[in-house]
Image: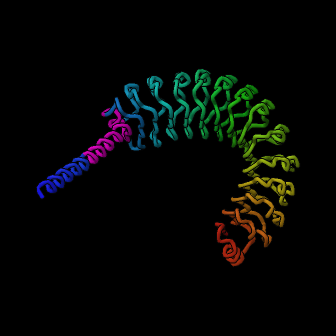
Amino acid sequence: MKLRLSILILLSTLLACGSDQSENTEEEDYQKFFAENASSIQEAFDHRFEVKTLMIDSREELDIPDSIHYLVKLEELHTGGKQMSFLPCNLCNLENLKILSVEWAGLDSLPFCLGKMPNLYWLQLSGNNITELPETFTNSKSISKVFLENNLIKEIPESISNMTQLTTMNLAWNQIETIPSSIGNLENLRLLNLEGNPIHNLPNELAQIDLVSLEISYTKITKLPEWISSSKSLKTLCIDSLQIGELPEWLGNKTDLKILRIAYQNLKEFPYWLKNLTALEELRLSNNNISQIPSWIENLTQLYDLDISNNPIESIPDNIINMESLGSLNVSGTNLDSTYVSVLQEKMPHCSITYKN
């Protein structure tokens, strides 16, 4: 009896110790997390030898100090709309920094040393007042993703070809008029967004790249380059609001396209060549003058998102209910009445129908 009691006491003690150890481990993990992830500059410097991620709130009173380089393990720096006209040069001494995100901050220039940061691969500087890309920046061998949309950039330097690791480049809504032919040397580039720039032409050298996504909506391009027709890698093509007149028939040969956006094109009918694009998952035809939807639309068996809003459409073919893959249908701003749409929604419970008139 005494032996049994001793064993029970021993087991109870071990379990209690295990519980304490577990609690201690959780507390250590908790402290480690807050040491490695800071939400203010003061917090970061309180743990300057441990912090890896710094997310600065827009209400932060302190500016990024010149002493930022003392955060020797910092890998990510994010600011949430905090206003600053420049970034301190010592930022470039953060050898472990991988991600730099400074959006809508009022920046008007880039530090010349950014291109020398050995591990920086993600650069997000959207919504600032940046006017140029310094040549020293384009010498970067590590940056692979660049997001510079909504700035005031007027020119892409020829030296952009030096950024050999670049896979994603978003320069939408800047003031760029020409694209240098040297861009064709970016053999790893896959996603290119030039929307909203006053560009008239695309260089033929882009044909040398296996682009997966090309976004050129709201530019001044008046003719789609022929090399698009021969691209075998392109999966996304956005050509909203281009003054190109009639769309080329060779678009019907782009059978690998998954996303196609052709809004604001003054289309008077559903392009017949679309029936060949059976891999399409998203199709945007909004803000045109299309009045009828063809019955062959059910052949687009992979289509998930269909936007035909703001067209004078009065009816939709009955066989659309057979499109089991269709998960989103936007018919806002059409001539369809609410009763018709309600009945259609009942017949297509798997599809979310947007209707606002």
Residue 189 against residue 263 in the figure, above or below: above
From the viewer's side, name the closer residue of 45 and 61: 45
Residue name at image x 37 percent, y 25 percent: 70
From the viewer's side, name the closer residue of 241 and 164: 164
Residue 159 against residue 204 in the figure, above or below: above
| Quadrant housing the N terminus | bottom left
Q: Position of residue 167 (x, y in %)?
A: 64, 34
Looking at this view, name the residue that lies furthest to the left: 2
Magenta stretch encompasses residue 247: no
| Quadrant housing the C terminus | bottom right
Magenta stretch encompasses residue 25: yes
From the viewer's side, name the closer residue of 179 and 295: 295
Q: Position of residue 171 (x, y in %)?
A: 65, 37
Q: Main secondary structure of the magenta part?
A: helix
- Visible in this render: residue 208? yes
Residue name at image x 46 percent, y 35 percent: 76
Q: Position of residue 157 (x, y in %)?
A: 67, 25
Instruction: Give the total of numbered labels.
Output: 0
Using residue 231 as the reference point, say whether residue 86 is left or right of it: left
From the viewer's side, name the closer residue of 262 and 257: 257
- Visible in this render: residue 314? no
Q: Position of residue 92 (x, y in %)?
A: 48, 24
Residue 189 against residue 260 in the figure, above or below: above
Looking at the rendering, which quadrant does residue 28 occupy?
top left
Residue name at image x 77 percent, y 41 percent: 220
Q: Which residues are magenta?
A: 21-46
